[in-house]
Amino acid sequence: MKLYQTAVMSGGVVEYELEVDAKLDYLIWFHFAEIDSSIKKVGQRVMDVVVNGKNVSRVDIYKEVGSFAAYSWQYVAKNLSSTGLSVKLVPVVGAVLISGIENYALVPSDLSTLPEQVIAMRALKESLRVPDRMGWNGDPCAPTNWDAWEGIVCHPNKDKTALVISQIDLGTQGLKGYISDKISHLSDLVKLNLSSNALGGNLPAGLGQKSLVRLLRSIDSLVRWYSLWPVLTVLKLHLFNMFYGVMDVDFVINDFYFVLFRDLSNNQFSGSIPDSLTSSKLQFALLNNNLLQGRVPEELYSVAVHGGTIDLSGNKGLCGVPSLPSCPLFWDNGGLSTGGKIAIGISCLVILCALLLVIYMCCIRRGRNDYDFGLPHDLMSLAAKRNKYQRQKSLMLLEMESQHAKGLPSLPLNPH
């Protein structure tokens, strides 16, 4: 190689000043070749390598590879404090000789978004009908030296091995779709703002609940283990939609006390109240003026019992708590309750048994009739005539015997 056919040789110090980025580490690659035929043994040419004032190595080319052979050596410079990197070759024995030097910035591999969260964000892109102008393409969070998708905030996960989505802010973007149920995969989501859009459909089960519960547990753990002073944190999940209403979740942590506030009032939300809207930390639940129906979960209504605030008015289909009508006996959450299904099953079984009993009785009666051999009318007439003939014959025989006894001539036997 031509690189090793030439060299810089000096009896004094050879110094290089390299321009670098202090935020990165650098790989310095030194290239040597002993091309001086006068060097015939170890120790005739020895030099020190000094990087940023630090003696990092002593090099004897002949000792490493002999004459007329290439020798390379690398050093990684870390924790730089300036934009200049000083490299010096200081002679120890003989003159300094170097064929070349290279400097490479070590750029760390960039993190990418967790695969399951990428799937969730793509599902949201489709369900929310996010316009192309927002540039929701590729990885939602990576590369980190670029901005994430518009309205998205990301941060590394706990293990620093991937990026996760912590905030979605898409207020007043003209969205007209619905919220995909895959939003539940965004387990690190602590803020969601979809206000002032035209979103519809039902609220997916577990919307934000997994991340909220995880945050509750994390903060509660910190309080127990580190005895933190009272902390005030507000987490707000706001879903206000132009035609379909408002959803507000304020999650307040104050003096080690957690308050979860949900406002879904004045909307067109339908169906039953999902279990995700119940929590032992819930203190405010405003679900008034919607189209909700079915039985109100006891856990939700217990908010008022424990000193919280709950408003379920304006939902004609809700039932089952003191402030609302009683639910039908076998009707629950817009459909048959478990008891109703059991009752219908038992009723069907009773009807089936009764039907089988009727069929059985009919078969028995018909079987008995099959052995009742009634004679036809003609046969009965013939039998009557024969009986009459026999009686007449018997009378005539008696009369003949009587006449014979008296000595009278007998009459011919002809009943007709």
Image (tube, rainbow, N blue to C red):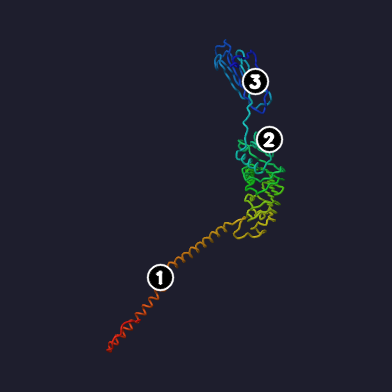
Tag shown at residue 193? none
Residue 209 in picture, x, y percent from top left? 63, 46
- Label 1 or label 2, whichever lies nearer to me, is 1
* Real-space CA distance between mark 1 and mark 2, rounded to the nearest whole angstrom: 101 Å
* Real-space CA distance between mark 2 and mark 3, rounded to the nearest whole angstrom: 36 Å
Amino acid residing under circle 3: Val
Tag shown at residue 373? 1
Name the secondary structure under disc 1: loop
Mark 2 sits on what residue? 147
**Quarter of the figure that contains the N terminus:** top right
Residue 99 in picture, x, y percent from top left? 61, 16
234 and 344: which is toward the camera: 344
Name the secondary structure under disc 3: strand
- Label 3 or label 1, whichever lies nearer to me, is 1
- Label 2 or label 3, whichever lies nearer to me, is 2
Amino acid residing under circle 1: Phe
391 and 307: which is toward the camera: 391
